[in-house]
């Protein structure tokens, strides 16, 4: 059962080959057996899962259908889940039980999805390796000595190890696409505003976006269908009709214009990954696509701009965690200032403290214009580059990451080295564009991903290209040894 995709599970449930309750029990037992190696879950929700599975079976018995009805999933542990710990991977929220469901959680529950648990993540989604979690690092199932990527590394590792077929993640600078690439999954960051952020604990509000992690583009289409849509509770949600993503999977790629930016192939990219990217280009050309070189001249400024904007927004968003209303509170504070200082010092880990300090500095009097305002101007230039490129091509293709997964702890002493792993992914967040990573091969036994970017609200185009590629390749079917 654990080898089935979401699409296969939907067909099996419809044909009454098994029940959602049987499937849920099977996967919960598998998680209990295998997850101690991975540390991919923070909280398991066995009682809720079995309750939801029984309810889904009853709905199917009454004639109801739906691709997600009875399908097991997990949520990254920054989606508020009513009555269940929502920790954000932090000691600060270790004791926090959300009083309501995030819109994404509520929508998927209404569609009949079964929540198996909450997955591990970098603390407050800040990291590229899933090593900053208060609950310990997540291990990559392809090599337990290596990172799975972050910050959605728990979701990625769990799906890659076949502990469940799909999971939710969030992407602020590549935190769905990067772990997807490092664990041999398909991961999709939707257009900013396509998926509601209400009840999704914020890191950087103008960059964060929820999305699906699964083994195939077909499964991502199913999960995105359940997640997407306008939400009046979220002021950044966009009222745009949600198409049938599954219906667009089988479109022809004949005449599709693919742009390959020359800036993607400079110093820093592992040449073996470059070769796999070009191999994927050749595979798409055989399916009828037309390829041309393009330029994104301001890409070189993306990392410095991102690492001003994101920490600035984080310093503002995380100011609510003060030890007063909820979350960690220090013992026996002398006064209010002592309460703030010690609660935050004890509750936040080193990476979160580092980004709060950077952000507070960038926003401070005398530095706002020099750093934050300039970064926002660069952000606009990056967006303009994409708009110009999409006048010439339909999608943009390149590597998801410059390197395969690195060893646990290898970059802990040099945070900037980890930041540089986001070089290809952060531009999509700065511009608000949809992006997808799909499996494209292996380097030294570790997975490599190829990234696709498209114009606003063209998630269906990304899923179509990835699906057609996956019909003609088998990278996405490979399973890590031991799982």
Image (spheres, rainbow, N blue to C red):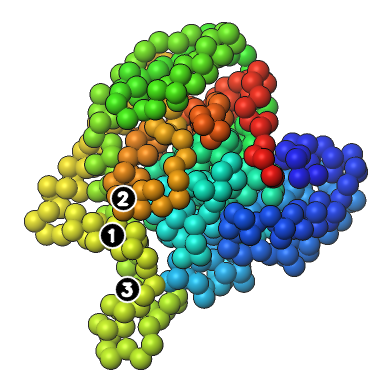
Q: Quick one: SS at disc 2?
A: helix
Instruction: Identify the residue at image location x=50%, y=46%.
Output: 146
Q: Residue at coordinates 76% horizontally, 45% vertically from top-left?
A: 2
Measured in 3D between alpha carbons, the distance from the residue under mark 3 to the one under mark 2, in whole angstroms, is: 20 Å
The front one of 247 and 128 is 128
Instruction: Pick whichever, 387 or 296, lies toward us.
Output: 296
Looking at the image, residue 74 sits to the left or right of residue 445; the answer is right
Find out whether the residues at labels 2 and 1 contact each other: C-beta distance under 8 Å.
Answer: yes
Image position of 163 with respect to 188: above or below: below
The answer to whether residue 104 shows anywhere in this view is no
For image coordinates 64% across by 21% down, the residue present is 473
The residue beneath circle 2 is 415
Q: Which residue is drawn at 21% across and 38% down?
A: 377
Tag on residue 345?
A: 3
Give the class, few, some or many, for how many residues have Cα within 10 Å of label 1's Cα (few <14, many ≥20): some
Residue 262 percent coordinates (x, y): 33, 18
Q: Quadrant of residue 203?
A: bottom left
Q: Name the residue under label 1.
A: 354
Disc 3 vs disc 1: Cβ atoms closer than 8 Å?
A: no
């Amino acid at each position: 059962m654990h080898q089935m995709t979401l699409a296969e599970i939907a067909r099996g449930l419809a044909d009454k080959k098994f029940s959602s309750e049987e499937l849920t029990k099977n996967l919960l037992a598998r998680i209990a057996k295998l997850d101690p190696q991975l540390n991919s879950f923070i909280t398991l929700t066995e009682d809720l899962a079995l309750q939801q599975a029984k309810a889904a079976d009853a709905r199917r018995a009454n004639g109801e259908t739906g691709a997600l009805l009875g399908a097991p999933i997990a949520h990254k542990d920054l989606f508020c889940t009513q009555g269940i710990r929502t920790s954000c991977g932090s000691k600060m929220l270790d004791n926090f039980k959300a009083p309501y469901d995030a819109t994404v959680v509520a929508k998927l529950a209404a569609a009949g999805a079964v929540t198996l648990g909450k997955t591990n993540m970098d603390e407050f989604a800040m990291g590229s390796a899933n090593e900053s979690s208060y609950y310990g690092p997540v291990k990559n199932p392809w090599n337990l000595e290596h990172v799975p990527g972050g910050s959605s590394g728990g979701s990625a590792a769990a799906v890659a190890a076949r502990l469940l077929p799909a999971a939710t993640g969030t992407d602020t600078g590549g935190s769905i696409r990067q772990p997807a690439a490092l664990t041999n999954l398909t991961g999709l960051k939707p257009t900013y505003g396509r998926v509601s952020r209400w009840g999704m604990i914020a890191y950087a509000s103008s960059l964060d976006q929820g999305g699906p992690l699964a083994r195939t583009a077909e499964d991502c289409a199913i999960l995105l269908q359940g997640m997407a849509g306008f939400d009046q509770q979220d002021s950044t949600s966009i009222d745009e009709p949600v198409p049938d993503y599954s219906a667009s999977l089988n479109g022809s790629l004949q005449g599709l214009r693919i742009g390959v930016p020359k800036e993607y192939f400079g110093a820093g990219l592992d040449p073996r990954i470059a070769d796999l990217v070009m191999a994927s280009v050749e595979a798409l050309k055989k399916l009828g696509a037309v390829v041309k070189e393009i330029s994104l001249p301001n890409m070189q400024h993306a990392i410095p701009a991102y690492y001003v904007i994101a920490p600035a927004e984080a310093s503002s968003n995380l100011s609510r965690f003060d030890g007063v209303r909820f979350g960690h509170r220090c013992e026996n504070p002398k006064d209010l200032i002592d309460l703030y200082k010690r609660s935050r010092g004890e509750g936040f880990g080193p990476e979160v403290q580092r980004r709060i300090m950077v952000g507070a500095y960038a926003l401070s009097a005398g530095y706002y214009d020099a750093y934050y305002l300039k970064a926002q101007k660069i952000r606009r230039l990056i967006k303009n580059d994409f708009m110009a490129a999409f006048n010439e091509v339909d999608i943009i293709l390149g590597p998801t990451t410059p390197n395969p997964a690195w060893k646990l702890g290898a970059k802990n002493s040099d945070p900037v080295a980890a930041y540089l792993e986001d070089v290809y992914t952060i531009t999509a967040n700065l511009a608000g564009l949809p992006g997808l990573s799909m499996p494209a091969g292996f380097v030294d036994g570790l997975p490599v991903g190829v990234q696709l970017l498209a114009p606003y609200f063209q998630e269906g185009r990304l899923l179509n290209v990835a699906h057609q590629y996956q019909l003609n390749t088998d990278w996405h079917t490979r399973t890590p040894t031991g799982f």
